[in-house]
């Protein structure tokens, strides 16, 4: 993928990189010859992934140990971005347990907002400000199909993912003129340790599960081409039917029915 490297330069930063989709983003980028700055709070898992990538691909992998829900860590990340002249930012980390709204603690409500919305908002702001004027660069924000309709059992998560969707979609248009490509990736069910830990039940109407590597690869290839990308044919078809054919009330009802069947039936 010389074309990709030519467009976005030698370095990429993946926030939330230790496992699942974050590790897949890091691996796809490394396999395309980019050096990767991995950011994660779990140093054990990050170290293992970083070592594997260094071994399998001839690229530099840097590790930053940071809790991304803590805004104070943004300064360290920006410093590293400037030092390496990194011009590609992937914001992947998120908190999204499946549970009743009232089973969240007050602190947990803040955690969703901080990790899923406040940090990407401020990180992107400072990243864009730090870029030399006119430098081609890219920002990919992981959102979710759960952010497109209010969805029971993941209500605070879905609300923050709606924020991410709008953040990236708006910036796509606003930053186009500055040669900054911004895209939201609205994933459906993806086979990550986090998703598996929610223990979804099989359901005929339920989502088909994609592999993290597939999602990361396709999303990166769409950067610069789209404001919002939905990986996977069945997710795209679902999106088409639920947004173009069915009225919103019916779509939201269907999404919520599927969710209930997957986790409560
Ligand atoms: N998986 C799906 O089905 C799915 C569907 C739609 C959208 N998405 C979106 O895709 C992205 C990744 O999905 P995923 O949830 O399956 O996760 P993942 O890619 O498996 O993991 C996210 C990474 O972020 C790290 N992380 C979590 N909290 C952090 C914090 N406070 N500070 C630093 N790093 C942190 C995790 O480390 P730990 O292991 O320490 O937590 C993990 O390495 C999320 O934005 C999610 O909303 C996923």
Image (cartoon, helix red, strand yellow):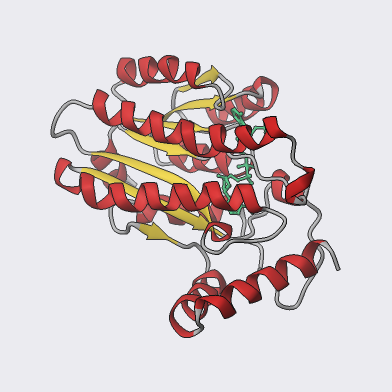
Q: Quadrant of residue 257?
A: bottom right
Quadrant where ligand 1 appears? top right
- Give the residue at x 66% y 45%: 96
Lateral position of residue 55 relative to residue 183, left or right: right
Q: Is residue 98 visible?
A: no
Where does residue 121 sit, x and y in percent of width and height?
A: 40, 35
- Give the residue at x 36% y 33%: 124
Near-viewer residue (151 or 30): 151
- Give the residue at x 78% y 59%: 200
Where does residue 82 sit, x and y in percent of width and height?
A: 30, 18
Q: Quadrant of residue 80?
A: top left
Above or below 37: residue 196? below
Lateral position of residue 248 relative to residue 41, left or right: left
Where does residue 256 sit, x and y in percent of width and height?
A: 68, 69
Near-viewer residue (11 or 169): 169
Above or below 5: residue 65? above
Count of number-bearing discs: 0
Where does residue 87 sit, x and y in percent of width and height?
A: 30, 32
Q: Quadrant of residue 16?
A: top right
Above or below 2: residue 123? above
Near-viewer residue (199 or 54): 199
């Amino acid at each position: 993928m010389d074309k990709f490297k030519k467009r976005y330069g030698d370095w990429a930063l993946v926030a939330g990189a230790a496992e699942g989709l974050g590790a897949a983003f890091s691996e796809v980028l490394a396999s395309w010859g980019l050096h990767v700055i991995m950011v994660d709070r779990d140093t054990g898992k990050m170290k293992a992934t970083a070592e594997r990538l260094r071994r399998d691909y001839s690229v530099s992998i840097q590790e930053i140990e940071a809790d991304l829900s803590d805004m104070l860590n943004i300064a360290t990340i920006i410093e590293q971005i400037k030092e390496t002249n990194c011009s590609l930012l992937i914001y992947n980390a998120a908190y999204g347990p499946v549970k009743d709204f009232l089973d969240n603690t007050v602190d947990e409500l803040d955690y969703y907002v901080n990790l899923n919305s406040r940090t990407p908002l401020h990180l992107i702001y400072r990243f864009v400000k730090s870029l030399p004027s006119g430098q081609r660069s890219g920002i990919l924000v992981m959102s979710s199909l759960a952010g497109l309709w209010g969805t029971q059992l993941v209500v605070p998560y879905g609300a923050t993912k709606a924020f991410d969707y709008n953040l990236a979609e708006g910036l796509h248009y606003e930053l186009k003129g500055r040669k900054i490509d911004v895209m939201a990736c609205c994933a459906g069910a993806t086979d990550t340790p986090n998703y598996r830990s929610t223990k979804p039940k099989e359901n005929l109407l339920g989502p088909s599960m994609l592999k993290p590597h597939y999602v990361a690869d396709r999303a990166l290839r769409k950067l610069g081409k789209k404001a919002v990308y939905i990986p996977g044919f069945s997710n795209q078809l679902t999106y088409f039917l639920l947004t173009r054919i069915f009225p919103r009330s019916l779509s939201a009802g269907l999404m919520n029915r599927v969710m209930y069947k997957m986790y409560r039936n």
